Image: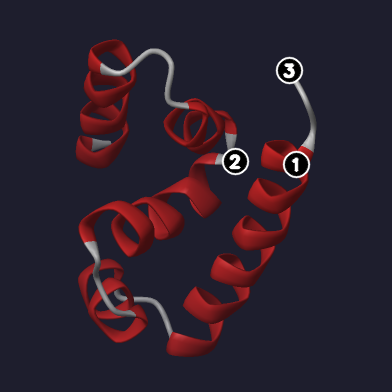
Amino acid sequence: MQWANELRRNVSLHPSCKLLRELLSLDPYIRTVVYPFLIKGWSSSRIGGCLKVSLVTIQTLLEIGREQLKRKLATPV
């Protein structure tokens, strides 16, 4: 929840940043993993430790999030 609020603040500060807007549109579970990885620079193991989730689960969610962001960012507005 804290990261979602932080992301919303960042989107309002940088409304033209497509990456931040698309991150906000991701599924909450995927966003919870992708946001600290991309924006905060956290490692997969750090995210897994913080969320108490296995590394395999974190890596799977990161892969799904990466694919979704790639598709969304490649589409012209």
Residue 15: percent from left, percent from top:
38, 13
Which class describes the residues within 10 Å of circle 3: few (<14), some (14-19), or many (20+)?
Answer: few
- Residue placed most toward the observer, 34 or 32: 34
- Asked if 17 appears above or below 58 in the picture, the reply is above
Q: Residues within 10 Å of mark 2 (few under 14, many from 20)?
A: few
Helix, strand or loop at disc 2?
loop
Q: Which residue, given by chain and number where applicable, does mark 3 sit on?
A: 77
Percent x, y for residue 77?
73, 17
First in residue order: circle 2 vs circle 3: 2
Q: Which mark is residue 27?
A: 2
Q: Earlier in the sequence, mark 2 or mark 1?
A: 2
Residue 74, given in percent of the width and then of the height, sits at 75, 41
Identity of the residue drawn at 54% across and 88% down:
56
Whether pointer 3 and pointer 1 mark residues with C-beta atoms closer than 8 Å, the reply is no
Numbered circle sitting on residue 45: none
Q: Is 58 located above or below residue 74 in the figure?
A: below
Q: Determine which quarter of the picture holds residue 27.
A: top right
Q: Secondary structure at mark 1?
A: helix
Write down the residue under mark 1: 74
Q: Is residue 25 left or right of residue 75?
A: left
Mark-to-mark CA distance, 3 and 1 = 9 Å
